Image (tube, rainbow, N blue to C red):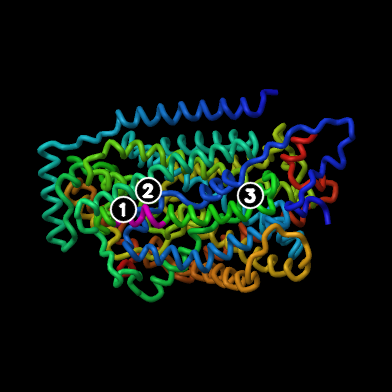
Amino acid sequence: MSAMDVPARRVPAASAATPAAAKPKTIHYISWIALALMTTSSVASLRAAPTMAVYGLACIFLYIVPAIVFLLPTSLVSAELASGWSGGVYNWVSQGLSKPMGFLAVWCQFAMTIFYYPSLLGFVASTLAYVINPDLASNGIWTALVIMVCYWSGVWVSSRGTGSVAGLASGGLIIGTLIPGVVLVTLGAVFLGQGNASAAPMDASHLLPAWAGLSSLVLIVNNFLSYSGMEMNAVHVGSLKNPGKEFPKSMFLAMGLVLLIFILPALAISWVVPADQLSLTAGVMQAFDAMFAQFGSTWLTPIVGIMLVAASLGGMLTWLAGPSKGLLMISRQEGYLPPFLQKLNKHGVQQNILVTQGLVTTVIALGYALIPDVSSVYWIFSVITTQVYLIVYLLMFVAAVRLRRSQPDHPRGYRAPMLVGLCGVGFAASLAALLIGFIPPSQFGGGNTAVYIVIVAGGALGLGLLVPFLFYRSRKPSWKTTDVTDPEAEVAQS
Amino acid sequence: MMDVHRERKVTWIVLGIFFLGLMIVSVFVFNSNKKNQQAIDKANQLSAELAKAGLPVPEAQQIYNVLGDDGGAVCAAPANALVKSILYGQLTNGAAGPGQRPIIADNKATEGVLLIVKVYCPEEAESFQQVINDLKYADVAS
């Protein structure tokens, strides 16, 4: 067992290898609160509030049930794993199952982000269009420009190291999610306090969403994915001073924040804006506009719009910095990627992976913005990528059980209660979400279900299994670089 | 090499100024005062249509503050592929991150927006009707 496997009692690996005369530089740690904010920023924002406000009081059910069966297992299991093994999901799965499976896990986590950025930044472009000139929303050049500028700025910031990302993501969350969230909830409370009746019924009979058979099941099970990403920032566990104790604390704080951010603003909007009127929205911003219009405060709309943009970009930074770092780490250890992609910049950041990913994202984003046929069907990529992401969770839960059995005495800063049960529930929830992903959604209209299944399965197998298999087959022992787990720590001490 | 803390400070200052500037510009550019006679007339017309459809009718002030006299963002090329992708992006689960995924939306999801298009930009109604006819719905909201 290497020192790197034990973040709870971490000894900087390079200190043992560094000649006594060499003076180690200071490692730039991040606080557990910053990591909690990063995690929250990766997962939650106000973007979903108007969508869920349509369900009124039932939005609590739609968030709490997934929290029990998915958020709780994911968070507690990753807290245990991160408190015992550094490096994030690649190392957990490598240790628990095998190195190739570890590569598969981190590849899936990484690959799905490539299709996530254009839709996230497309949202940024439409939000900016709403406050500047709504006609821009339909302008491909505008959308492409916003995506390119934001994405490459994000790559530049990410290449400055985890510390920069942690600070900006935390700032983005506070400015773009927590502050406007408090404003929304306060306005909602004022609205009720003024004696107005809630637009959405708030009685016990509306606690559950309407049951419409399979469609309701699709809604409920797909909501499990609201919490996907909770484990992603574990890759930065090496940037904590005392990871064994601090990572679990950061997860608990993030869990609480995520739940509050998802539920309270959605409820507040449902108090003020009738569900049918929410459906009038031509974008998330219009729901906020309608909310502020109730108070004659539409001047708040552009301010909140820019805040939402800041939060989205902060969230994007965490996704840029996380999975690519995990991919780098296992590739350096096992030689899965060619040396060019393993190259680090002066901050110890996987700059070439980020740039290569950026080039691929650029092509996809330009297609999304400029080719109508691509933008019209872009939603299907979100189905495929979430399917790919669920593979990560399936592997993680199996690995956690295997590690508890194969390495029961391995030091862990935190031991999740009833781990096997938690993993069983989490695995079942992930599998259910994977299966429900094959049911055609609204956007597929009356299309052929078999065709849909073939598209989703083919896309998920190609992106999630075929590509990493090709990388795996092409690996070379000479591509192994080092066994130091965290390249940023390595650079800081060199 | 520039000190890391200084470098971060510079990044913070640059981004802070950028977002503050963007916020100030957007406040000036954003049209938050959309009240005029035509906006009031359109709001009344929409109220009547909503009532006729059995949907809740918001206050006229709320309608014209959001939609103005031209339907605002709703009527900015509603059948355009990018705008359609924004609409599709709303017919999703409650995720705000990469877990966002399409669902089978509620029957009411596009009822209201179609009424707006019919009142504010009737010339777009046919093409927009086609967009929403292509979608599948269910009665999933309580």
Q: Residues at marks 3 and 2, common chain?
A: no
Residue A127: x, y in percent? Answer: 38, 41
The numbered mark at residue A323 is: 3
Kind of element beneath mark 1: helix
Q: Amino acid at mark 1?
A: Ile
The reply, left or right, for residue B36 in relation to residue A146 is left
| Neighbour tally class for label 3: few under 14, some 14-19, many 20 plus, Cα within 10 Å | many
Residue A159: x, y in percent? Answer: 64, 35
| Neighbour tally class for label 2: few under 14, some 14-19, many 20 plus, Cα within 10 Å | many
Q: Amino acid at mark 3?
A: Pro
Q: Is residue A102 visible?
A: no
The numbered mark at residue A269 is: 1
Which contiguous range is marked in magenta? A263-270
Q: How many marks?
A: 3
Give the chain letter at badge 3: A
Residue B47 vs residue A224, the one in the foreground:
A224
Q: Which of labels 3 and 2 is toward the front? A: 3
| Residue A265 among magenta residues | yes
Q: Quadrant of residue A468?
A: bottom right
**Residue at 35% from the left image edge and 28% from the top image edge:** B25
Position of residue A227 relative to residue A28, above or below, is: below
Q: Residues at marks 2 and 1, common chain?
A: no
The numbered mark at residue B81 is: 2
**Residue at 34% from the left image edge and 31% from the top image edge:** B26
